[in-house]
Amino acid sequence: MTPRIPKAVEEIKRREAAGYAFDVAEASLDLLMRRAAGWSQPFFDIESYRVHVEERVADDEPPLAEATVKVRTKGTPAHRVSRRAGPGGRARQTRSARR
């Protein structure tokens, strides 16, 4: 058994203890195993990101979370913003812009 297999098994155990379920996410398990074997393929580079959570008190509204991510794919910059209300809320607004 190569030393990478026990490392991958420990990573799977750690993630399952944190709530991940690989029995319904075969692609995620495949990527985890490939990475444990030394494979990597950078699909994009993260330039920066930020998350802002706004606690709203008017009309008992749920909190509003906004995430902004700037990435570069094949040299092309991209900027994405997504807003969601409450835990697991649906996206309220998504914008994208080129720099």
Image (cartoon, helix red, strand yellow):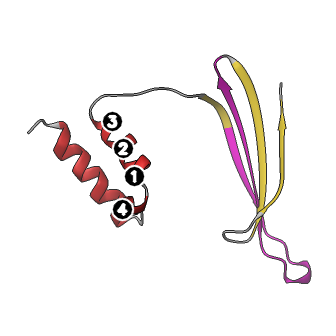
Q: Are marks 1 and 3 in contact (CB under 8 Å)?
A: no
How much space separates mark 2 and mark 1, taking CA atoms?
Answer: 6 Å
Q: What residue did someone put label 3 on? A: 34
Secondary structure found at label 3: helix
* Mark 3 Cα shell of 10 Å, populated few (<14), some (14-19), many (≥20): few
Q: What residue did someone put label 2 on? A: 30
**Disc on the earlier residue, 3 or 4:** 4
Residue 50 at x, y percent in the picture? 70, 45
Secondary structure found at label 1: helix
* Mark 4 Cα shell of 10 Å, populated few (<14), some (14-19), many (≥20): few
Q: Which residues are magenta?
A: 49-74
How much space separates mark 1 and mark 3, taking CA atoms?
Answer: 12 Å
Q: Are marks 3 and 2 in contact (CB under 8 Å)?
A: yes
Q: What residue did someone put label 4 on? A: 23
- Specify the label residue 26 is tagged with: 1
The prevailing secondary structure element of the residues shown in magenta is strand
Give the number of the mark in front: 1 or 3. Answer: 1
